[in-house]
Amino acid sequence: MTGRVEGKVALITGGARGQGRSHALRLAEEGADIALFDYCGDAPSTEYDMGTKEDLEETAELVRGLGRRVVSAVGDVRVQADLDDAVARTVGELGRIDIAVANAGIVSWGAIHEIGEQQWEDTIATNLTGVWKTIKAVTPTMLAQGSGSIVVISSGAGITAPNNLAHYASAKHGLEGLMKVASNELSPQGVRVNSVHPSQVDTPMIMHDSMFRLFRPELDNPGREDIVEISTNLHTIPIPWVDPVDVSNAVLFLASEEARYITGVMLPVDAGGSIKSVY
């Protein structure tokens, strides 16, 4: 049976672990060869550990285990030359780029008047400008092919207005405009552009002490189990968070021929969080 993206090549930023790893494996399961791109370094304005070179290599090995080819590159989505080099290497080794998943992102928290200038600048540069630079990097190849699918990983915070996330929400709301303009410009030439908007996803980006303390400041040492009820209350479907594969399934759909006439769409994968009434 032919996979849903059989014979295609997908480039995924933030591919070392978490959602990026899940997207890589899901697309590989359905026949795609994979190019992984990740920073693999510290981000001073965040309070959790970032993916490592070991994580990146582990993801690459998992892709190979599925019988697919893989290219991996360490780089920074804030640096255009890093992305351009990764694209050139991907095309050189894998022949083309059919799918780009702009997944790399960081998160931190703070009241709007307490967010540090470096926090703000790092978040906007990574989560918004980094996506623009990713699109900029892959577009010439896709236009030359006359086809492609770009999937932007945004957030429920790109639809709603969560407290303590002014910098993050600003970047994610900005992605809506970026995605729609890119779709307007590129879809007439065969390149579709869409975005996916997850709720909280069960990955290391969310599951760490800083997040737990944000949700349960009254507890001395809150853990994962202490945020289940609060997290569940954010959704209409009674779950605390979605799994990475739930987001990856949406990415796969948008990247596949099943979505061949879908472009400029914001697709929530948020258990109803973006439409939940407060009444």
Image (cartoon, rainbow, N blue to C red):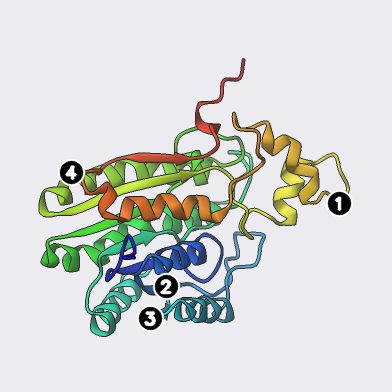
Q: Nearer the viewer, residue 24 or 161?
A: 24
Labels 1 and 4: the sequence-earlier one: 4
Judged by depth in the image, the label closer to the viewer, 1 or 2, is 2
Amino acid type assigned to the residue bearing label 2 in the image: Phe
The residue where tag 1 is placed is 221
- Distance of mark 1 from mark 2, alpha carbons? 35 Å
Amino acid type assigned to the residue bearing label 3 in the image: Val
Please state, as top left, top right, bottom left or bottom right, where the C terminus lies in the image: top right
Element class at badge 2: strand
Residue lying at 75% horizontally and 42% vertically, measured from the top left: 227
The residue where tag 4 is placed is 184
Please state, as top left, top right, bottom left or bottom right, where the N terminus lies in the image: bottom left
- Distance of mark 1 from mark 4, alpha carbons? 48 Å
Residue 105 point in image, percent of width and height:
49, 58
Element class at badge 4: helix
Judged by depth in the image, the label closer to the viewer, 4 or 3, is 3
- Distance of mark 1 from mark 3, alpha carbons? 41 Å
- Pick out the residue farthest to the right: 220
- Distance of mark 4 from mark 3, alpha carbons? 30 Å
- Distance of mark 3 from mark 2, alpha carbons? 9 Å
Q: Nearer the viewer, residue 120 or 48?
A: 48
Residue lying at 37% horizontally and 81% vertically, measured from the top left: 69
- Distance of mark 4 from mark 2, alpha carbons? 26 Å
Considering only vertical position in the picture, is 229 above or below 12? above
The residue where tag 3 is placed is 71
Considering only vertical position in the picture, is 19 above or below 25? above
Residue 120 point in image, percent of width and height:
51, 51
Judged by depth in the image, the label closer to the viewer, 3 or 2, is 3
Name the disc covering residue 37, or none.
2
**For residue 159, what is the image quadrant?**
top left
